[in-house]
Amino acid sequence: MPWDVLIVGSGHAGTQAAIMLRQLGFAGSIALLGEETDLPYERPPLSKDYLAGEKSRESLAIRPAAFWPERAIDLIPGEAIVAIDPAAHIVHARSGNRFAYRQLIWAAGGHARQLGCPGSHLAGVHAIRARADVDALHAELASAGRVAIVGGGYIGLEAAAVLRKLDKQVTLLEALPRVLARVAGEPLSQFFEAEHRAHGVDLRTGVSLEAIEGGSRVEALRFAGGTRIAADVVIVGIGIVPSILPLLDAGADGGNGVSVDEHCRTSLPDIFAVGDCALHHSRFAPGAPVRIESIQNASDMATTVARSIVGDPAPYSATPWFWSNQYDLKLQTVGLSTGYDSTVLRGDPDTRSFSLIYLSAGAVIALDCVNRVKDYVQGRTLVEARATIDPMLLADPEIPLKSLFQRA
Amino acid sequence: MPTINVTKRDGSTHVLDGQDDLSLMQNLRDGGIDEILALCGGCASCATCHVYVDETWLGQLPSMSADEDDLLDCSGARQANSRLSCQIPFTPELAGIAITVAPED
């Protein structure tokens, strides 16, 4: 018997799809296939509280074990899907098992991108993507004093903050001229660089890694120009590779992600895709399709698919939001800054409470708010309306953002 | 077991067994109140665990932080008894508390 709904991937997107289907009254059979053997768990704490040892493995669980059978959601762990036969409505797992479906929700996310340089597979080189990655890292951290982090994105920066708290000697290396270069404007990058340096991180940008050196395990990193940095442990945080090959092999449209329409349908019949791997057009980023790696996107896309399956479809149009916690800094983002042509700095970064507002042709498209929850909350309305507001007014932290715009 | 009385959005009522080493949000989530999304996991970065607390219990809750206060403004359905359930540790004194899940925004 085929599963009425087969969900590939038991991360935030996959689990939310299953939970939402039941919440909406879906009575058919649901299976949730996971590559890992864990109960579905939350990923954001992996680079934060869980890495810090402040959150237990049990408390990572998205729901208690008993929840899934109560909701008649069949968890099938340890199955990685390697091929899809869209005509027969069957997926093939690496184990050799096959699963038949009436409707398939692909929520496989991605795997941590690996370095391509020599030595990148030495013992002591870690990613932070799965719970097991962080457990492996923990096992080595006890006896490691020097940690090198490759990649100045959110994962790398959050890990640096935690490891400084654990009193490790931390070097953070970014190939581009500034951290967060792909996701944030220059003032935000400069702020976080200064914060990490003030907390004792040896942060170096514009460095080109040539090799990880060592015998049986990592001993040092070597850079273009001959510089070497000794390290007991290396953390690689250079993004993810979306897990979409089986879909593309089966003929789905895609590229850097699997293409989906406003209902998260792929180009293949009865196959949806949600979350980190879904390449979609967003009204918050006109132009080229985007792939968004966030809990918000995973959850809201899952809801979109669940509604579609129960016959109450509504196109995906949720406002993107994101957060990152480093030291005592709470960064909150609303909107997508992709394609901004100017920024407005609201407040003084030296006060450690400010916002960076992104504009495109004069319209507000996104905000990065550091320790300024009010701006994050009030800025959402501006982003949703693509409001055009005098930059002089936006820049004045004394003027509440909500006073600058009335929703039509 | 100390109980938590929950009214869901459809008006149905549920009595949960509360665990006092968890927040109110975690109790609601683990107790199968799936309307509580709690997307940020309880770090006060979103407002998807918004509940109304029965007035008689308000005085026994920890006071609201500025961040929680600001985040509640995300919701168009904010009321005087609105709280983010992730910011309320479920202590034995709260046994019998009554809450209503706030409408979706």
Image (cartoon, rainbow, N blue to C red):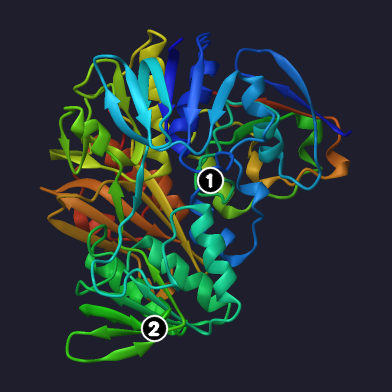
- The reply to whether callout 1 and callout 2 are in contact (CB within 8 Å) is no
- Does A291 sit left or right of B36 as displayed? left
Quick one: quadrant of the C terminus of chain A?
top left
* Frontmost residue, A47 versus A180: A47
Q: Amino acid at mark 1?
A: Glu
| Residue A344 vs residue A38, the one in the foreground | A38
Q: Residues within 10 Å of mark 2 (few under 14, many from 20)?
A: few
Mark 2, residue position: A215
Same chain under badges 1 and 2? The reply is yes
Mark 1 belongs to chain: A
Q: Tag on residue A42?
A: 1
Q: Look at the numbered disc 2 and give the secondary structure of its residue.
A: loop
Image position, residue B100 (x, y; %) = 67, 25
Q: Residues within 10 Å of mark 1 (few under 14, many from 20)?
A: many
Q: Which residue is located at x 59 percent, y 39 percent?
A: A39
Does residue B13 appear left or right of residue A307 in this picture? right
Choose top left, top right, bottom left or bottom right for residue B55. top right
